[in-house]
């Protein structure tokens, strides 16, 4: 097993280093367009802090918290990291989102080796239950988290955890209510016949039994192998963003960063272990900036939450209707299950019925 792993890593490193003519992802920025405000860094300064389990506030797991420096009350995003990832590897996206007036709380649910899905899910539920009192403990007196606007989010396996929490599959009873959900290239297993436990997918349209707004940001390269000789993929068809979108009820939107891969949302500087993990997934090549991917993920998340938390639909409407005019990275496809419509009537680039009154803002 160790010999096979060494060979795999050596092959991945050799392939990456010998790429002389990388295929660049298609960027929306290559065309003449206007980048919408949500894809630019916001007006708030960001403060980053680590909170350990031994602190006086006693979170169930160690946390990375990124928040605005300015006093105020801000919506909260509970973000779950991907398989074998560190919460610190998402710092660029967290800071970008926080700059628009959000508090991001990212627990480190385990070390290098993941536990069973149920154990990880229960740990995530414990962190969620800690938030109402615990977050108040770690924040300054003039900064407050708005628990009435609490979003679930996660990347890869962490995206699965977010959906499983929303579905109430944790053995730990939840004491908080979530108002929105964001999945970043979520993955619910290895294949249709080998799902994570507890399973979330039934392969029936609109089968999820929750109705909070959902935004899913998938990748175009996640379902492709890093090397032809190793057919495994990091976001396999049938258990990733496309099927998860299929099973969401309205309102739910689906965006695919067509030129990027499963690990391209991570920071550039993620150390040797992170680099090896990135090489095991197909993604953008050496020398290609991942910043458009990160800003697109952050901007879509901000626009989505601004719409459903604050009633500001302008930027979200722009992305739904003219995504490649406003987003830094190409989004294709863009699909939306409109609120108030049947699940069978899906239409790319359609607008939710509740957004109709805002058309004149475009």
Image (tube, helix red, strand yellow):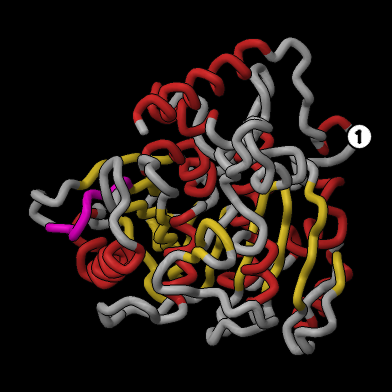
Q: Is mark 1 on a helix, strand or loop?
A: loop
Q: Name the residue under label 1.
A: 32
- Residue 18, quarter of picture: top right
**Does 176 appear above or below 270?**
below
* Quadrant the N terminus occupies: top left
Is residue 63 on the magenta stretch?
Answer: yes
Above or below residue 47? Residue 245 is below
Q: What stretch is highlighted in magenta?
A: 58-64
Which part of the image, by quadrant, shows the C terminus?
A: bottom right
- Please state if 120 lies on the left or on the right of 353 as rendered: left
Please report the residue visible at 66 percent of the width from the left and 68 percent of the height from the top: 243
Residue at left 65%, top 34%? 283
**Image-based side of 228 in relation to 84, left or right:** right
Q: How many labels does the image show?
A: 1
Considering every residue shown, the one lying at the far right of the view is 32
**Residue 211 on image: x %, y %:** 58, 84
**Rendering coords of residue 306 (x, y %):** 61, 64
Which residue is at a point 46% across and 27% down the rendered structure image?
A: 276
> Of residues 55 and 197, which is closer to you in this image?
197
Q: Main secondary structure of the magenta part?
A: loop
């Amino acid at each position: 097993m160790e010999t096979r792993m060494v060979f795999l890593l050596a092959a991945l490193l050799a392939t990456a280093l010998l790429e002389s003519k990388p295929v660049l992802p298609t960027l929306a920025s290559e065309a003449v367009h206007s980048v919408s405000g949500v894809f630019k860094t916001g007006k708030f300064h960001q403060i980053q802090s680590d909170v350990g389990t031994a602190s006086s506030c006693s979170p169930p797991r160690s946390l990375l918290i990124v928040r605005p420096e300015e006093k105020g009350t801000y919506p909260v995003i509970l973000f779950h990291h991907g398989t074998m990832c560190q919460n610190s590897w998402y710092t660029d996206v967290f800071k970008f989102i926080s700059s628009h007036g959000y508090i991001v709380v990212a627990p480190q649910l385990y070390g290098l080796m993941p536990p069973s899905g149920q154990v990880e899910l229960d740990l995530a539920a414990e962190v969620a239950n800690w938030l109402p009192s615990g977050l108040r403990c770690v924040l300054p007196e003039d900064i407050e988290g708005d628990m009435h606007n609490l979003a679930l989010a996660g990347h890869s396996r962490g995206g699965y955890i977010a959906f499983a929490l929303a579905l109430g599959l944790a053995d730990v009873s939840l004491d908080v209510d979530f108002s929105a959900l964001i999945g970043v290239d979520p993955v619910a297993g290895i294949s249709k016949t080998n799902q994570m436990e507890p399973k979330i997918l039934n392969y029936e349209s609109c089968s999820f039994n929750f109705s909070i707004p959902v935004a899913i940001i998938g990748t175009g390269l996640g379902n492709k192998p890093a090397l032809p000789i190793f057919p495994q993929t990091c976001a396999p068809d049938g258990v990733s963003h496309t099927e998860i979108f299929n099973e969401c009820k309205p309102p739910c939107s689906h965006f695919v960063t067509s030129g990027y891969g499963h690990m391209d949302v991570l920071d550039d500087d993620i150390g040797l272990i992170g680099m090896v993990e990135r090489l095991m997934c197909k993604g953008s090549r050496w020398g290609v900036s991942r910043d458009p991917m990160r800003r697109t993920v952050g901007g879509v998340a901000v626009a989505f939450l601004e719409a459903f938390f604050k009633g500001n639909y302008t930027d979200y409407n722009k992305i739904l209707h003219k995504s490649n005019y406003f987003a830094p990275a190409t989004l294709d496809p863009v699909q939306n299950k409109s609120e108030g419509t049947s699940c069978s009537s899906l239409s790319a680039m359609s607008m939710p019925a509740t957004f109709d009154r805002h058309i004149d803002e475009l």
